Image (cartoon, rainbow, N blue to C red):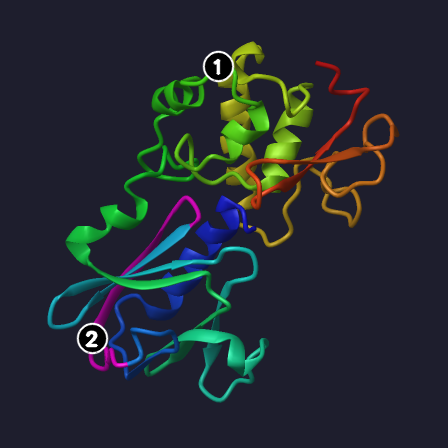
Amino acid sequence: MPEGDTVWRAARLLDRALAGQRLTASDFRVPGLATHDFTGALVRGTVSRGKHLLTRIDAQAPWTLHTHLKMEGAWQAYTHGQRWRRPVHTARVVLTTPQRVAVGFSLGIVELLRREDEHLAVGHLGPDLLGSDWDEEEALRRLTEDPQRPLVHALLDQTRLAGIGNMYAAELCFTSGVRPTTPIGQVGDLPRLVRRARLMLSHNKQRAEQSTTGDLRRGRRTWVYRQPECLRCGTAVLVEQSGPEGRERATYWCPSCQPG
């Protein structure tokens, strides 16, 4: 699933392609929205909230297009006549301006909300690690509400803090020297871990190739995530499935560097 920095970049891409432009066509290829036509509507802009995207469009009333990339989704922008880089049949939303065409492929969520109802889509989220309204104290309060909860589960819970996915959760556990299943109440210096999370996402938000090691070379961008061996000590990385039934996720960790 895309991390918060990936979604942040998607919002910037949509902003560059659409903000301040009037749509010459709109095409919603999802059940229930196919009859909506925003031709002539003004796109105010797009913001990210954790892993959610909110594209604000002024038609006869203020609307918000709420999209979520889920596992395989992506937004891409093209010039007119440019060949799409993904299969046409996977397009879920096509927004056209005089200069650009923005296409949302394989989107996990596509819905239209009245502007005043945006909270219905994102009001449940915790503080956004890349948000202008970031609140470290509130994030720590939410994370520690259940001291017995495994650290990795708390980090992945978007209602605690928003923006962390599998990769950052594994890497944050590693850089803190903590086994992912350690109860969060037993994690020392949790504020430092949260600050590191924000720093990691901030450093990566401007580039397509994410790195938690500071090394952008292939195979050296993460310490343990999807690594056969720990990049620091060479110990075989362990992979465990954890999480609620039906929503299990792979967790990567080094038994030597993360003893507790």
**Front one among 158 and 18:** 158
Image height of 123 relative to 47, above or below: above
Q: Is mark 2 on a helix, strand or loop?
A: loop
**Residue 32 lies in quadrant:** bottom left
48 in the magenta segment: yes
Labelled disc at residue 211: none
What x and y, as percent, mark residue 153?
54, 30
Judge left or right: residue 112 versus residue 163: left
Image height of 69 relative to 180, above or below: below
What x and y, as percent, mark residue 85?
59, 77
Q: Which residue is drawn at 39% across and 69% down?
A: 17
Q: Is mark 1 on a helix, strand or loop?
A: loop
**Residue occupying the far left of the picture:** 60
**Residue occupying the far bottom of the picture:** 81
Labelled disc at residue 41: 2
Image height of 69 relative to 49, above or below: below
Labelled disc at residue 147: 1
**Residue 211 lies in quadrant:** top right
What x and y, as percent, mark residue 134?
35, 32
Q: Give the range drawn in magenta.
A: 35-51
Q: What residue type is labelled 2?
A: Ala
Of label 2 and label 1, which has the lower sequence position?
Answer: 2
Neighbourhood count class around disc 2 (C-alpha, 10 Å): few under 14, some 14–19, many 20 upward: many
Q: Which amino acid does label 1 sit on?
A: Pro
Image height of 252 relative to 99, above or below: above
**Residue 28 lies in quadrant:** bottom left
